Amino acid sequence: MDNKNINFISRQLMRSSTKGYLSTEFCKKNKEKVKITHLKKPIPFSSFIMTAFDYDGTPLLLLSELSEHTKNLKDNNIASLMFYEEIKNESFFPTFNYKKIRFRCSYEDPMSRPRLTLLGKLELSSSISHKNRFINRHPASKLYANFADMKMYKFNIIKGHLTGGFAMVKWFEKDDLIYKITTGFEENEFGVMQHMNEEHQMSINLYANKLLNEKKKKNWKITGIDPEGFDIRNGKNFNRLIFQKSLKDSKQLRKEFVLLHKKASTL
């Protein structure tokens, strides 16, 4: 597989993640709080967090100022963020064939599935678009997203590291994982999404049932659109459909949705 394709599928692994594992450096105040100041070397602190993404693929996090990891970030905003495959995609990451090594196993080893670790700097974001994208992806966050202590952060990628299963390992530069052409998406995404959800429910259900093999037949909603695909949700069920070809402008969305409808209708 060439580097361009590895970059693309790694970005889709990231974009299809709704959660991740954030590692920060335990700060001085936290060390004093739990009485471990005698440990002089840096101490990593891992947290389970929910994630959304900007149109270019930059991770977006909604964090509480009261949480330990946010206190850590105020001392040192460099962190790592790990994603583990949530939506299995055999065309991107095929199941390892154990027969090749004459080894029998009754289940698939989780270590054979892909995960992506990012190194980067977290930065406060005042963007309304960032908060809206997070809330649309995680509707339950409406309950607390506007609390005074809740702040949006963007994770500015420095490096990335993919373990894509056995014998697939790669380091990435920031530009490998960011999709730079996002013309018109911030201005038009929410209008297009509202139109699709209100006027084309049948098409969205068709995408879910025929193109993503989802068993729930009705009431799927689009929760986010970017130049490479769109996210759908039905209650706790989440999935992502990747466009047949990445878009360069939001004006291409209508044509792409029509093509997907035609494709789904033939299945």
Image (spheres, rainbow, N blue to C red):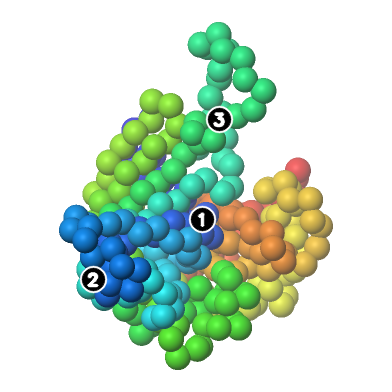
- Tell me what residue is drawn at x 67 percent, y 48 percent: 212
Give how far across and how far down residue 166 sits, in percent. 43, 27
Q: Is disc 3 in contact with disc 1, using a CB cutoff of under 8 Å? A: no
Residue 17: numbered disc = 1
The CA distance from mark 2 to mark 1 is 32 Å
In the displayed structure, does residue 213 sit left or right of residue 15? right
Give how far across and how far down residue 9 sits, in percent. 44, 44
Residue 72: numbered disc = none
Total labels drawn: 3
In the displayed structure, does residue 42 sit left or right of residue 167? left
Front position among marks 2 and 1: 2
Q: Which residue is mark 2?
A: 28
Q: Which residue is mark 3?
A: 109
Name the kind of residue labelled 2 in the image. Lys
Frontmost residue, 113 versus 136:
113
Give how far across and how far down residue 179 sits, in percent. 35, 58
Q: Is disc 2 in contact with disc 1, using a CB cutoff of under 8 Å? A: no
Q: Secondary structure at mark 1?
A: loop
